[in-house]
Amino acid sequence: MKHILKYTILLATIFICVSCEEEDELRKESVITLQEMHNSELDKWIYDTFTKPYNIEVKYKWEDREMDNNFHVTPPQTEKAEAFLKALLELWIKPYEAEAGTEFIKTYSPKLIYLVGTPQYNADGTMTVGLAEGGRKVTVFNVNDFTLTDMERMSKAFHTMHHEFAHILHQKVLIPTEFKALSKGDYTGAWYNVDEVNAGAAGFITPYSMSKFEEDWVEIVATILTNIKNSNEKGPYMVPDYDDNGEAKRDEDNKMIWVEEQMSQWTHKLMLIGIGAVRDNRNQIVYLQHPNANDGRNKLLSKITMVNDYYQTVWNMNLFSLQRRIELAAIKLIEENTKKEEDDDEE
């Protein structure tokens, strides 16, 4: 910065000296040339699709001021940014708009969405995939890994978007104090050392939920909304055969008994809370139930009820109805783009 300042002062001095010596008359026309910024077709589409109707600014080109310079990240590939934004319209804006209304999106959506191509790697070995800043800006990382034909990658990317948007909403209307009390004392900064089984047995939907109560809240929201493969329709799933006390039954060889039942993918996820697979001394896979699995599941169910009640009461929004809209939109988007890729390959 000092070098820039010195250079500026030097130029100014030279200009003054030359001006004093020549004393030319001022020109009537402006000597400042304004160059019109180039807008690509994608830029125009972004303006017409997000900025004009919803007052959302989208940035995908590199801007140094938008990033923390302590991290090494890169801008997204243009085609990946375009793919993500097409999905953003179909899987985020339109479902929320249909469920809660256009004014809801206009009022509460972030005013700036900034896309980054790569993840942000942290000193503790974790990876940041999204940031929400004061309800105004959401940064989405790892856009270069996004695709319109893969349900898993699509779900992972929009888990981030729903997670960050849930932060914005609870900053507007605070999380109920009863929710904070449910896992008081269980939150930890070392959440990344906890696996899914132990997190579930402690009453958390994901290990990251254990970092703080705000993350606990938004992870429940994001997991509901992105658990989209057959999530609203029942299908055949294998689950442990539980007794009346929530303990998994075992056969005469002490192996866990599994039964097939019709349920949604979401219910199936909850039924496996605290269940983990390990290899025994004969290198065979065996399933174990965490001693606190039943208590953890009940605690998590209480949290889910609180989250659903909050969204219904505060925002007049049913999370599972919203989930259904996202599921159908995701299936349609994948089918369309898979067919498009197949057609392109045939040409």
Image (tube, helix red, strand yellow):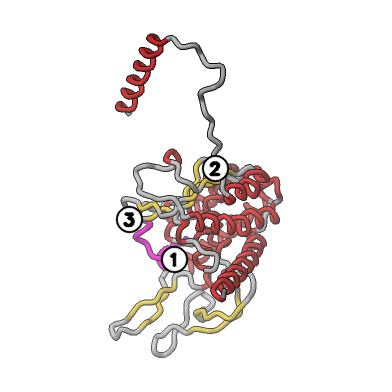
Q: Position of residue 272 (x, y in %)?
A: 49, 73
Of residues 244 and 1, the one drawn nearer to the viewer in this rendering: 1
Within 10 angstroms of label 1, few (less than 14), some, or many (20 or more) residues? many
Q: Which residue is mark 3?
A: 125
Q: Was residue 198 drawn as part of the magenta stretch in this picture?
A: yes
Mark number, residue 231: none
Q: Are marks 2 and 1 in contact (CB under 8 Å)?
A: no
Within 10 angstroms of label 3, few (less than 14), some, or many (20 or more) residues? few
Q: Was residue 306 drawn as part of the magenta stretch in this picture?
A: no
Magenta-drawn segment: 190-204
Q: Earlier in the sequence, mark 3 or mark 1?
A: 3
Give the foreground label among 3 and 1. Answer: 3
Quarter of the image where one finds residue 136: top right
Q: CA distance from mark 3 to mark 1?
A: 24 Å
Q: Tell me which residue sits at (30%, 83%) in the image.
A: 283
Q: Which residue is mark 1?
A: 201
Farthest residue in the bottom direction?
Answer: 252
Q: Tell me which residue sits at (35%, 77%) in the image.
A: 278
Of residues 336 and 237, the one drawn nearer to the viewer in this rendering: 336
**Where the N terminus falls, by quadrant?**
top left
Q: Vertical placement of 18 versus 342: above or below?
A: above
Q: Position of residue 4 (x, y in %)?
A: 33, 27
Q: Amino acid at mark 3?
A: Gly
Q: Earlier in the sequence, mark 3 or mark 2?
A: 2
Q: Tell me which residue sits at (51%, 64%) in the image.
A: 147
Q: Which residue is mark 2?
A: 38
Q: CA distance from mark 2 to mark 1?
A: 54 Å
**Where the C terminus falls, by quadrant?**
bottom right
Is residue 213 visible in the rendered image? The answer is no
Of residues 9 and 32, the one drawn nearer to the viewer in this rendering: 32
